[in-house]
Image: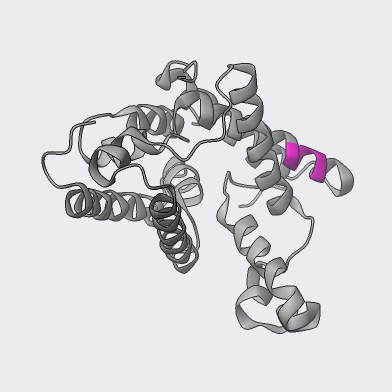
Amino acid sequence: MKTPRWNPYLVGALIGLLSVLTFSLANKPLGMSTGLAQAAGACAVPFLGAEGVAQNTYWAKSAIPAWDYSTLFLVGTMLGAFLSAVLGGAFQFTVDSSVWRARFGTSKPKRLIAAFVGGFLALYGARLADGCTSGHGISGCLQLAVSGWLFFIVMFASGILTARLLYGRSTQA
Amino acid sequence: MALPLAFLTGPELLGAAVLFGALFGFLLHRGGLTDFDVIVRLFQFRDFTVLKVMLPSSTSSR
């Protein structure tokens, strides 16, 4: 079951225009990782208490859990992607990936653990860099921010290296 | 010089956050950028969908 894709150049142009809208109407870049850091803070509330989270140096700086713009934007992205999948008749619960299957087989736990570790590393790096593929890669690059382009180049290089290490030269799927 | 660009505040801003997020998520999904295989194949130089989406997004905004 394949998602009905739109022309990638058109999608890119529309994301650029959406970015103009969010900057001009809300003074916000397109970005996801702040919302995720806030969600992580919310997960820590039962252990540290709301006070403890608010006093934590990291969360206090930019990511105190709250139903604010960043969090709601993140919720919105999930709703939008869900809507796109449902409207396109492509929605399904699955952990399958043809590239992964060709290299690592069909074990679900293996794939889920790898996804968790990968997600952990990606988000840790994104927060160290103060932005993710959306924040730096899209919003940073389109402002011609040096940090955005540097992030993009290094992310690309490490992606190539990681894909080579994990999948080797020959995996074709 | 920084022009005051944030026209939306309060509940309107929060509503806009959901709407903007939904548009972004919809576009990412339709562009194929939510697909694990697309991302891995990019780094194997076998599928350039991600670049096709990101490069115009950086130019259409100016």
Does residue A44 belong to the magenta stretch? Answer: no
* B12 horizontally vs A23: left or right: right
- Residue A123 x %, y %: 48, 60
Q: Residue at x 43, y 16 (%)?
A: A7
Above or below, comparing residue B21 to residue A2 in the picture: below
For residue B32, side relative to residue A163 (left or right): right
The picture quadrant where one finds residue B5 is: top right
- Residue at x 50% of width, y 44% of height: A139
Is residue B16 rendered magenta in the image? yes
Highlighted magenta segment, given as a residue range: B14-18
| Residue B15 % position (x, y) | 81, 39
Q: Place residue A82 in its image quadrant.
A: top right
For the stretch drawn in magenta, what is the main secondary structure? helix
User: Residue B22 appears at what percent x and percent y?
Assistant: 67, 33
> Can residue B5 be seen here?
no
Figure check: A63 above or below A90 = below
Left or right of residue A113: residue A76: right
